[in-house]
C-alpha cells in the first residue's frame, strides 16, 4: 500500500452514526463494532467519497490546530491510520470490490454498543412500539385489552407510517444504531415493510418482536434481505398445549415455531422469548432443548408485570414459593443476584443509552419505564432528548436514592427496575414488592453471598 498514491473509499456495508465529534460504526460485512474519536472520525469521513491520504492531511490541517506537529509526522500518522482502517475493513482500496453483507450476530457487540451509548449519552438502542393491536389475547400481556382489541380513542391515536419514518430519521440523527420494533403484533400493521425498509435505508440494525404467526415465505424472504439482527418470537413452552393456553389461540404454537424454522433457514437469528408463569415454570429445560434443536436462542422473562393501566389481574399468574425456587435452581445465571453498587452509581441506563417511542408518540426512558419525557408530535426527538426536565431527573437517579422495599433496604436486588417500581409501587425509587420477594427467594436458594459475574 502507498497511501499517498492509492485511492480509498468507505466500505459499502457500514452503518455509521456521528455522535458529537465521534463516529460509531457497525460493519455489516464483518459483524463488528467500531468507535472512532474526533480525529479518526474526521479522517474516516474523508473517504465517504473517493480520496487519498493527501486529502485527509489537508482536511486535518484545516480543521485541527496542528501547527506544533511537523508535516512529516502528520503524514506518517495519517498513513498509519489508513492502514488501521483497511485492517478493520472500514475502507477499501478502490481497486478492490466491496465486501458483501454477512449475517448480523448482535450478541457479539451489543453490550459494547450499550457501553458506548452510556459514554456519549446517546440513545444507541431505541425501541418503537408501532401499534398496541394484536390478534392474540395472551393471558399475561401488559397491554390492556382495550388497547389491543377495541377502537383506539383520539387521545391515544397511533403514529401513522409517515410519522414513524420521521421519528426513525430523528433517531438516526440522535445516534441510534439498534432499532427494536415491537407491538402489539408488528406484522398485522399495514405498511410494516415500508417502515422496516425505511429503517434499513437509514442504516439501522433491526430487532423485531413478534409472535411470528403472520409470517409466510414471501415475508421471510423480505426480512432476510434487511439488516435484521434478531427476531424475537414469543413462545411460552416447548409443549404446544401449554403455549396455546397462554395465547388462548389453538394452533398458535405450531405457527410460531414454523415461522422460526423458516427464518433460521433463511439465515435470520431467532430468539424465543419465554415469560415465566405458573403454567410453564417447569418447562425451562424443554425450552432450552427446543432452542438447541432448531438453532434458536432462548431467553426468559420474569416477573409478569401489572398491565400498563395499573390492572394487577396478571399477578395471579406469577410463580412463587416452591415453583419460583425451582425456577431459580433451573436458571441460576438468569436469577443471579447482582453485586451491590456504590451509592453514587446509576441504577440503570434508562434515558442514557436508550429510549422507547410509544404507539401514540410518547418518548419513554425505556419501554418498561412509563414516564413520558415528551411526545414526538409536539417536539422533535432532539429537543426532548437534550432538554426534557424529566429526562434529566431520570438520568440523575442513583443507587443511593433508593427507598426501603417491603423487605427493608437490601444490599442489592434481582431485576431491580425503576420502571417496574413506578408501575407497581407508584414510586420509581421504591423497589417493587415482587423484586424484593424474588431477591429473598434467590438468597434462600443460591445464598445471599452469591453474585452475578
Image (cartoon, grey):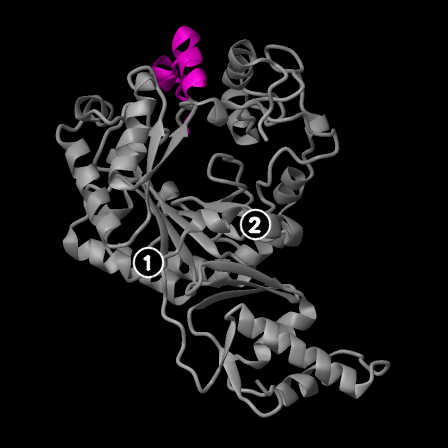
Image x and y of residue 384, in percent: 58, 52
Dominant SS of magenta comes to helix
Give the residue at x 36% y 27%: 275
Give the residue at x 15% y 53%: 217
The disc label shown at residue 112, or none: 2
**395 shown above or below 414:** below
Q: Nearer the viewer, mark 2 or mark 1?
A: 2
What is the total number of numbered labels drawn onto the structure image? 2
Image x and y of residue 126, in percent: 48, 49
The magenta stretch spans which residues? 308-330
Q: Which residue is mark 1?
A: 196
Q: Which label's residue is closer to the chain start, 2 or 1?
A: 2
Image x and y of residue 399, in percent: 69, 29
Q: Nearer the viewer, residue 98 or 263?
A: 98
**32 shown above or below 154:** below
Q: Is residue 438 left or right of residue 185?
A: right
Image quadrant in which the C terminus is located: top right
Q: Is residue 49 left or right of residue 240?
A: right
Q: Nearer the viewer, residue 19 or 26?
A: 26
The image quarter in which residue 417 lies: top right
Amino acid at each position: 500500500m502507498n497511501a499517498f498514491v492509492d485511492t480509498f473509499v468507505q466500505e459499502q456495508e457500514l452503518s455509521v452514526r456521528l455522535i458529537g465529534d465521534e463516529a460509531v460504526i457497525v460493519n455489516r460485512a464483518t459483524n463488528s463494532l467500531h468507535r472512532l474519536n474526533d480525529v479518526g472520525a474526521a479522517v474516516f469521513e474523508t473517504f465517504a467519497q473517493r480520496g487519498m491520504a493527501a486529502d485527509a492531511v489537508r482536511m486535518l490541517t484545516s480543521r485541527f490546530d496542528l501547527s506544533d506537529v511537523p508535516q512529516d509526522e502528520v503524514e506518517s500518522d495519517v498513513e498509519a491510520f489508513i492502514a488501521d482502517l483497511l485492517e478493520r475493513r472500514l475502507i477499501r482500496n478502490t481497486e478492490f470490490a466491496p465486501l458483501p453483507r454477512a449475517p448480523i450476530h448482535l450478541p457479539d457487540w451489543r453490550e459494547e454498543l450499550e457501553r458506548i451509548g452510556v459514554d456519549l449519552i446517546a440513545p444507541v438502542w431505541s425501541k418503537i412500539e408501532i401499534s398496541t393491536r394484536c390478534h392474540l389475547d395472551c393471558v399475561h400481556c401488559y397491554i390492556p385489552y382495550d388497547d389491543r382489541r377495541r377502537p383506539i380513542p383520539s387521545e391515544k391515536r397511533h403514529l401513522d407510517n409517515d410519522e414513524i419514518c420521521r421519528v426513525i430519521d430523528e433517531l438516526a440523527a440522535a445516534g441510534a444504531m439498534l432499532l427494536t420494533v415491537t407491538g402489539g403484533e408488528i406484522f398485522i400493521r399495514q405498511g410494516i415493510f415500508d417502515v422496516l425498509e425505511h429503517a434499513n435505508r437509514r442504516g439501522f440494525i433491526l430487532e423485531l418482536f413478534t409472535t411470528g404467526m403472520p409470517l409466510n415465505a414471501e415475508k421471510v424472504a423480505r426480512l432476510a434481505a434487511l439488516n435484521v439482527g434478531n427476531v424475537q418470537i414469543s413462545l411460552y413452552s416447548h409443549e404446544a398445549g401449554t403455549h396455546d393456553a397462554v395465547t388462548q389461540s389453538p394452533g398458535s404454537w405450531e405457527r410460531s415455531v414454523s415461522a422460526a424454522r423458516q427464518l433460521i433457514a433463511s439465515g435470520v437469528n431467532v430468539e424465543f422469548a419465554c415469560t415465566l408463569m405458573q403454567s410453564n415454570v417447569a418447562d425451562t429445560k424443554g425450552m432450552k432443548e427446543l432452542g438447541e434443536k432448531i438453532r434458536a436462542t432462548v431467553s426468559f422473562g420474569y416477573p409478569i408485570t401489572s398491565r400498563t393501566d395499573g390492572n394487577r389481574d396478571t399477578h395471579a399468574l406469577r410463580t412463587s414459593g416452591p415453583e419460583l425456587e425451582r425456577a431459580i435452581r433451573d436458571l441460576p445465571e438468569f436469577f443471579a443476584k447482582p453485586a451491590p453498587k456504590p451509592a453514587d452509581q446509576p441504577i440503570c441506563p434508562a434515558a442514557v443509552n436508550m429510549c422507547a417511542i410509544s404507539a401514540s408518540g410518547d418518548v419513554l426512558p425505556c419501554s418498561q419505564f412509563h414516564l413520558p419525557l415528551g411526545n414526538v408530535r409536539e417536539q422533535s426527538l432532539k429537543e426532548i432528548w437534550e432538554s426534557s426536565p424529566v429526562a434529566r431527573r431520570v438520568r440523575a437517579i442513583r443507587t443511593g436514592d433508593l427507598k426501603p422495599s417491603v423487605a427493608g433496604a437490601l444490599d442489592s436486588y434481582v431485576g431491580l427496575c425503576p420502571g417496574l417500581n413506578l408501575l407497581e409501587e407508584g414510586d420509581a425509587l421504591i423497589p417493587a414488592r415482587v423484586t424484593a420477594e424474588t431477591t429473598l427467594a434467590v438468597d434462600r436458594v443460591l445464598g445471599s453471598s452469591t453474585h452475578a459475574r
